Image (spheres, helix red, strand yellow):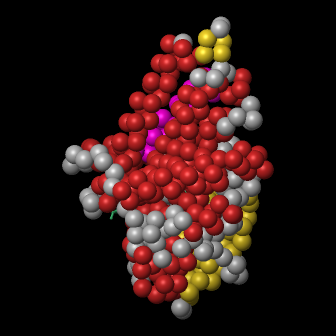
Amino acid sequence: MNFDFTETQLMIKETARKFAEDELAPSAIERDEKEEFPYEAVKKLGELGFMGMMVPEQYGGAGLDTISYVLAMEEISRADASCGVIMSVNNSLVCYGLNEWCNEEQKKKFLIPLATGKKLGAFALSEPEAGSDASNQKTTADRSGNEYILNGTKNFITNGSTADFILVIATTDKTKGSHGISAFIVEKGIPGFSVAKKEKKLGIRSSDTVSLAFDNCRIPSENRIGEEGFGFKFAMKTLDGGRIGIAAQALGIAQASLDASIQYSKQRKAFGKYIAEFQAIQFKIADMATRIEAARLLTLQSAYLKDIGKPYGYASAMAKLYASKVAVDAALEAIQIHGGYGYVREYNVERYLRDAKITEIYEGTSEVQRIVISRALLKD
Ligand code: CAA
């Protein structure tokens, strides 16, 4: 076993940390308060090569491995988890799927602008009645000559109103269950496609989360990804990798909670001593650090398995399940350590808790991760 990072991986981590500290952290509280999408930061993330990190260079990406992606995601999310999810969706749900399963023409038209950060992507699987039960797709895509006609609603779509290209999962044959679901690329602005509702959220408030409506929206059949009926497997395989990104996002929030706790406890005095001198605080910090390190190892292990071409869905489910819980617990402890200051918006830690909670919900709830893990263990 080798736990050393390569020089490139260390350089990526350093670049991400510097960008996050200089450009994201100072304005993160304000963006959260105003629920303001970080257009400028996303543009710069693209220029740094962080919007298509694992895409080969020939398709506009940075040609890096998943470990580098995890390191960068953690650093970005440590400063601003809203930026983290924007980056994660574009990298692991959109660019990954396009790179793996699109044809050459689709890659030239859609993947290159997405991987270079010139365009932004979204992934539309969830529906009002299809969250955890993802195969219960009510959105339909009916074939009509060289087109498909889309009808239905997609819910809770990250990047939904800002994205230029949206990967849409829809039913092409109701009689076939999960085998009758297909995946499509929809371009922003086409007739019949609209943003139905912008969500007001507990956390990750400067990311964009909306419902999308399709009303007799016609898309060319060349925008279908893979064969008809491949859509559910496409979504599941893509989410296997997406969960590594969300685990890394959770890790970033947890690390930020620990860093803030260490810093605060060395400055704040109570009963004539710095609170860091009390064992009650010391033990909280020790527990937080230990859990974060375990979450980091699980997350890096799942990234490593993906990089060496081994099955990783089980490992990424474990990483997300564990890291998301660690993030919520770390943020709660950080608030406790900060006392009243932890509860007010002037400090970052209450934002960490609000941001952490979603990592237990999106890209598969913690209960869904337990389904994935237990099925892998119990199958014949
Ligand atoms: N890789 C490849 N194939 C897979 C797969 C995977 N990871 N998971 C399932 N499949 C295949 C199965 O093998 C099966 O194929 P066959 O019929 O040929 O045998 C088929 O897909 C159906 O699988 P299941 O019977 O396991 O399906 P299920 O209905 O029981 O659902 C589930 C399983 C794990 C609960 C799944 O529905 C799931 O993951 N739900 C959560 C969805 C999710 O994560 N949504 C997140 C939305 S995106 C998002 O959140 C983005 C964002 O904003 C940040």
- Tally the marks: 0
**Quick check: is 259 in the magenta stretch?**
no
Q: Which residues are magenta?
A: 319-337
| Quadrant observed for ligand 1 in the rendered image | bottom left
Q: Residue 233 in the image: state x and y as whole percent.
A: 39, 65
Please provide percent x and percent y for residue 182.
47, 73
Q: Going 40% across and 69% down the picture, which residue do you hit?
A: 63
Q: In the image, residue 157 lies at what x, y percent?
A: 62, 60
Toward the bottom, the furthest residue is 145
Taking the image as drawn, is residue 238 in sight?
yes
Relative depth, front residue between 248 and 237: 248
Question: Which residue is at 49% across, 84% downward?
Answer: 108
Res 139 → quadrant: bottom right
**Whether residue 68 is situated above or below residue 224 in the rendered picture:** above
Using residue 323 as the reference point, say whether residue 7 is left or right of it: left
Q: Residue at x 66, y 76 (%)?
A: 188
Q: Give the x, y percent position of residue 37.
A: 71, 58
Examine the rendered structure and indicate whether residue 284 appears above or below residue 308.
above
Q: Is 373 drawn above or below residue 363 in the view shown?
A: above
Asked if 235 appears above or below 344 in the picture, the reply is: below
